[in-house]
Amino acid sequence: MRKLYCLLFGLLYAMTSAAQGNVSIGKKYSLPSVILGEKRDYWIYLPPGYDDTTYAPARYPVVYLLDGDANFHSFTGIQEILAQGPYASIPQMIVVGILNTDRTRDLTPSPAGRKAYYDPKATLYANSGGNERFIAFLQKELRPHIDSAYRTSGYNILQGHSFGGLTAVNLLLHHTRLFNAYVVIDPSLWWDQQLMLRQADSILPRKDFTGTNIYVAMAHKVVVPQDTTTDHPMAIRAFSQQLQRRQPQGLRWQFHYYPEDDHGTVPLPAAFDALKFIFSGHQVHVKQAVQDPSLITKHYAELSARLGFTFKPTERYLDWLGSYCLRIGRTDQAAAIFRMAADLYPQSKHTMEQLTKTRQR
């Protein structure tokens, strides 16, 4: 598995190094927050075809990355490769990297200072417990801003690591519908005597999570004598056991342990695996679709039912598939695919032209 990730980023490096001039994967912006009383920076990645005027304007799912400056480069690279071409494993998505100002304040759900192991008089995490205000910022300021500024589809994913994973679990339990899917990477569920676990024990069995997906990743932990979080892996294991025992209604979830990765390296493989889990079944078997285009409709209906959200094939994909059918002499199948595209994207001039050309053959 590790070789796979090395190959992945070797390919990314080769792709960017081969180009002349500057390479840009996103833009930096700021949003003044009334709720937090400060300016918040965020980074935006847009799919390669976002501004392509060949096709009708598409709408895209959005991934929100906590600790955005640490995860933006790796995540956008993974997302772009998985979403490439007719064999894409996931849809193209907009990525929003949220940068920190006071990380402990924003990503912890309660004021729970700890005595420092190096000095009993010192308190760790003194400025903590502002998670609800930060969540209000996400819900009332950042999300509406992104939805108004970009062509978003309404399907939203949150990824959080460590304290960010703690925030993701808090959102899952108390603000479930704010996001459709949660990527929870090595979360700090030890926080405040396992506050989230105690709350989860009562919430998980009685709440309806239909349409919600969660991927939980756990890194390998080497305990050292002065460690202040020796209960970190035990709390994550306990959460996975709660999910197994409680079987929350409608919640689609997966837990994975990464024995070869520590707390610092696990975000990379976990993000890769989480995207494949969330969108499992996204890839259409091209050779089968060429034989029977109706399988595309059936496939996306099943994907939509699994995720609790309506997904449809992109116009770009249908255009490629219809053109491929023409190249191999399957005119009837090409016509069926272009008709499908015309039904889904009636405002597209390109698709109507393709359909007209096909009928004239």
Image: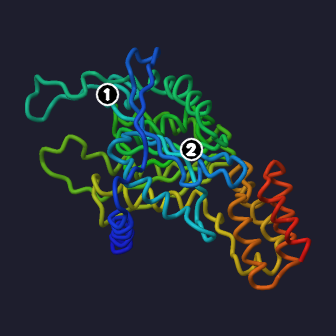
Q: Mark 2 sits on what residue?
A: 62
Q: Residue furthest bottom?
A: 328
Up the image or down, 223 lies above or below 63; here it is below
Amino acid identity at mark 2: Val
Q: CA distance from mark 1 to mark 2?
A: 22 Å
Q: Residue at x 74, y 73 (%)?
A: 323
Front-most of residues 130 and 231:
130
Q: Give residue 265's quadrant in the image.
A: bottom left
| Residue placed under numbered mark 1 in the picture | 101
Where the C terminus falls, by quadrant?
bottom right
Question: Of residues 179 and 111, which is closer to you in this image?
Answer: 179
**Which quadrant holds the N terminus?**
bottom left
**Where residue 257 sits in the image (x, y, percent)?**
39, 61
- Left/right placement of residue 91 relative to residue 25 reads right
Which secondary structure lies at badge 2? strand
Q: Position of residue 303 (x, y in %)?
A: 71, 59
Q: Is residue 117 above or below residue 62?
A: above
Q: Position of residue 119 (x, y in %)?
A: 8, 29
Report whether residue 217 is seen.
Answer: yes
Q: Amino acid at mark 1?
A: Thr
